[in-house]
Amino acid sequence: LLPQLEKHFHSYLQCGGFPLAIQSFLKYGIVSEEAKETYRSWVIGDILKNGKSDVVAREVLKVILSKAPTPVSWEGISQETSIKSPPTIASYIELLERLFVLLPLYAVKPSSGTKEFAKNKKLHLLDPLLWHLCEEWCLQKIQHKTETIVEACLAVHLARFLAEKHRSKRLSDAVSYWRNGFEIDVVVHNNGLSGFEMKWSNRKEAFKFKVGPVKNLTYVSKSTWLDKPLKIPLPLLLACL
């Protein structure tokens, strides 16, 4: 079962989950330029329909691609664009979230389970195809691209699962991250806090257990299992969701 899931997951990393992209990938082994243009036009068109500039949105996305998956601030993004206005950056991030392009993860305070909105945010695109499209559109190479996309897959699919379960209005409602000396990539709010740490590796030394404030911690690996600490392959975890 796992080899089959891994095969499908690697295809998903290349074409994402949009129907036209899947169809062309299954037919040609690549996502066609026609499919790419369809979804690129959708993103740009919806940005313009909401009274925003596609040029500014491109600048914002370029910075996000250059920083991902490192947490960033609106001030930090603004300093690398022509806008220089953190509130304007925040408005573009909010629009991209509402358009289901972007998933922001806010820092969590484990002692209370509350989100710390003033701290830096982790910003994930919602689909592998969007990473590829934005990389081309923004002319910005993504460093450690596979690792960045698989961490986004983990966060996005956990967010979708919990949003459906709790009937949340925003995908970001039940997911966060934690960072203080080391990082927990995704913290889910579901009858308490549980952490998921993505390690796109099978090396045993990559999964050294770290004691932190989020006690229920699961490591997510490339393809290997382990009971203590709990380690589960990402393709299998996503299939379970």
Image (cartoon, rainbow, N blue to C red):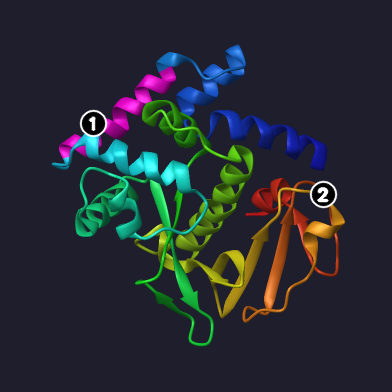
Residue at point 41% right, 33% down?
Answer: 134
Is residue 149 shown left or right of residue 135? right
Residue at point 31% right, 58% down?
Answer: 74
Above or below residue 88? Residue 54 is above
Magenta segment range? Answer: 35-49
Is residue 60 shown left or right of residue 55? right
Q: Mark 2, residues whose alpha carbon is within 10 Å: few (<14), some, or many (≥20)? A: some
Looking at this view, name the residue that lies furthest to the left: 51
Residue at point 69% right, 71% down?
Answer: 217
Q: Quadrant of residue 63?
A: top left
Between 170 and 165, the one nearer to me in the picture: 170
Estimate the x, y position of residue 218 in percent, counting from the top left.
71, 66
* 144 in magenta: no
Estimate the x, y position of residue 223 in percent, counting from the top left.
80, 46
C-alpha distance separating marks 2 and 1: 42 Å
Q: Amino acid at mark 1?
A: Gly
Looking at this view, name the residue that lies furthest to the top: 28
Q: Quadrant of residue 191?
A: bottom right
Estimate the x, y position of residue 69 in percent, counting from the top left.
52, 51
Label 1: which residue?
Answer: 45
Is residue 229 shown left or right of residue 191? right
